[in-house]
Amino acid sequence: MAETFAAIERDFLQITSEVVWCTVTTVDGAGRPRSRVLHPIFEAIDDRAVGWVLTARTEIKTRHLAANPHVVCSYWSPAQNVAYADCTARWVEDDATKRHVFELFRTTPPPLGYDVSGYGPDEHRSASFTPLRLDPWRIQVFRFGGWDKPILPRLWRAEELAPRSPAPGA
């Protein structure tokens, strides 16, 4: 049964902050999955999770997201804690949001945050500064309590963001 985001927020943000790096899977124009390792920072905004990634806006990523903006972020820790975020992704274009993301990465303590001075004096206005916004529509967390205990997934879903199944026969 799905829970409110507030009910799983602490576990989700803790797992993603501790693991730091996750596997992100996109889908190419032919429907084939493609995975890569990225370093998002998730934060709670208006009772929802929003993820930010500083990544190269490569031709491949741009094509994949244009064909299908759905991505999956998968986190796993050696303590057997797991978090999944099924998201829609889009490139950030507006100055205010780019500034927010730049400051978030600059001011968050390492290893989650890091030195973004490599973007030069233009900072968030640099042509190479290309944040990606992740809007989860489904989040699942597993906290491992030991091999002798059941592993119960906890789930949050934003129905209004979830992709719709095609109509029968479509």
Image (cartoon, rainbow, N blue to C red):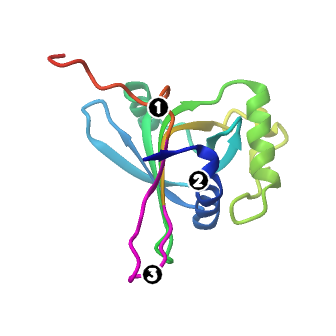
- Looking at the rendered structure, the kind of residue marked 1 is Thr
Mark 1 vs mark 3: in front: 3
Query: Which comes sooner in the sequence, label 2 or label 3?
Result: 2
Gap between marks 1 and 3 measured at Cα: 41 Å
Picture residue at 24% right of the left edge, 18% below the top: 167
**Which residue position holds label 1?**
62
Q: Quadrant of residue 164?
A: top left
Say which element carries label 2.
helix
Q: Nearer the viewer, residue 72 or 113?
A: 72
Picture residue at 47% right of the left edge, 73% below the top: 144
Residue 115 shows up from this direction: yes
Gap between marks 2 and 3 measured at Cα: 20 Å
Say which element carries label 3.
loop
- Image quadrant in which the C terminus is located: top left
Mark 3 neighbour density, 10 Å: few (under 14) some (14–19) many (20 or more): few
Picture residue at 39% right of the left edge, 33% below the top: 64
Magenta segment boundaries in residue numbering: 142-156
**Which residue position holds label 2?**
8
- Looking at the rendered structure, the kind of residue marked 3 is Gly
**Which residue position holds label 3?**
146
Q: Position of residue 65 (x, y in %)?
A: 44, 31
